[in-house]
Image (cartoon, rainbow, N blue to C red):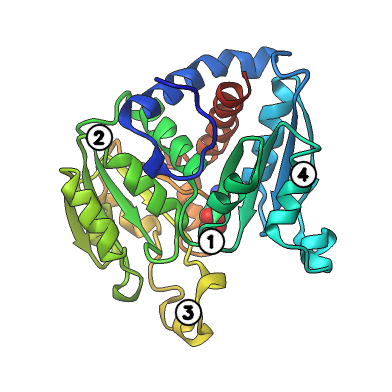
């Protein structure tokens, strides 16, 4: 297997590569605690043209734990791209001269791929429009493996906004490389795009579609809840029609398998009731920490 250069789409990764990333991540658990200096000479730039808490800060935490340095912006308005109309290409051609790796989040589909084409340093996609969020998918796979001891053989429910949610697009592609059953649970208006469902089926995945939370939580090992992506709706009235319609609350707990785990990429709004937090099913804050571990693995693999 060759080196890992850019990380743009889950479609660029095969099962062998994903398993390799997950096993490097497992090695990072101990390194995260005692810290390391392997990336002491390296600089990571974070270019965030959209809001973020976990993705940006976990990338920074990962880099700092490996001894590296970080720079960047968290608000496009403070950069020349936002404030002065600089093109993405020019921004990339500038930042590649300041850093050894570029981590980018941008509202446009394809933005990370285009950035990689212009960049002489590796580019990592930290969220491109509603299209993809590959490092989130990898940390989700890592969390599932850590919690369940395996991925093959599991039944997983992807719930919420499957139309605009980039995390479920990437996770769906990643899971398709394993022997799993995937339940797609969304209100009719927010169904997963048929093209992605076809890809999953072609990969041999058993795909089931449901349109309510009750069916979503039954008979599965993992319930992956997501936020309705308000900011991606072309018409806010369409959002108003679906908001609050797909909520996981303590009423659903009796329907779930005793050992089912609930994951969520976060942030949540009202789709995952805080009452769930204190139940043994709630694993989303442990999942947050896996974000640091997984991103340490990615930075190590790309930069050494
Ligand atoms: C997600 C994103 O930005 O796509 N957040 C994250 O990175 N953990 C999910 C979301 O915003 O709903």
Residue drawn at x 48%, y 53% as measured from the top left: 275
Q: Is residue 223 visible?
A: no
159, 234: nearer the viewer: 234
Secondary structure under badge 1? loop
Mark 2 and mark 1 lie on one chain; the one further toward the N terminus is 1
- Real-space Cα separation, disc 3 to disc 2, in angstroms: 33 Å
The numbered dot on residue 129 is 1
According to the image, label 4 marks what residue?
Answer: 95
**Image quadrant where one finds the N terminus:** top left
Q: Which of pointers 3 and 2 indicates the residue nearer the eye?
A: 2
Residue drawn at x 40%, y 64% as measured from the top left: 161
- Real-space Cα separation, disc 4 to disc 1, in angstroms: 21 Å
Q: Position of residue 131 (x, y in %)?
A: 46, 58
Secondary structure under badge 4? helix
According to the image, label 2 marks what residue?
Answer: 178
Q: Is there a contact, CB below 8 Å, between mark 4 and mark 1?
A: no
According to the image, label 3 marks what residue?
Answer: 239
């Amino acid at each position: 297997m060759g080196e890992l250069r850019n990380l743009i789409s889950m479609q660029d990764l095969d099962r062998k590569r994903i398993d390799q990333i997950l096993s490097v991540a497992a090695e990072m658990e101990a390194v995260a605690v005692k810290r390391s200096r392997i990336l002491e000479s390296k600089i990571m730039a974070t270019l965030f043209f959209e809001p973020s808490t976990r993705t940006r800060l976990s990338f920074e935490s990962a880099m700092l734990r490996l001894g590296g340095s970080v720079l960047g912006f968290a608000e496009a308005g403070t950069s020349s791209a936002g404030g002065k109309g600089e093109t993405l290409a020019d921004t990339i051609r500038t930042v590649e001269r300041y850093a050894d790796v570029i981590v980018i989040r941008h509202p446009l589909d394809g933005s990370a791929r285009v950035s990689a084409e212009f960049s002489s340093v590796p580019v990592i996609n930290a969220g491109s429009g509603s299209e993809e969020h590959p490092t989130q998918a990898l940390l989700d796979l890592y969390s599932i493996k850590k919690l369940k001891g395996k991925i093959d053989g599991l039944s997983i429910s992807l719930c919420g906004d499957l139309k605009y949610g980039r995390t479920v697009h990437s996770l769906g592609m990643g899971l398709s490389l394993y022997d799993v059953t995937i339940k797609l649970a969304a209100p009719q208006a927010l169904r997963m795009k048929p093209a992605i469902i076809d890809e999953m089926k072609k990969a041999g995945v058993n795909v089931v579609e449901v349109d309510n939370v009750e069916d979503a939580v039954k008979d599965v090992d993992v319930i992956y809840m997501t936020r309705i992506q308000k900011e991606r709706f072309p018409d806010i009235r369409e959002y108003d029609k679906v908001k609050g319609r797909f909520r996981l609350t303590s009423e659903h707990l009796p329907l779930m398998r005793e050992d089912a785990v609930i994951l969520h990429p976060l942030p949540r709004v009202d789709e995952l009731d805080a009452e769930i937090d204190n139940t043994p099913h709630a694993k989303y804050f442990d999942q947050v920490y896996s974000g640091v571990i997984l991103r340490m693995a990615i930075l190590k693999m790309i930069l050494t």
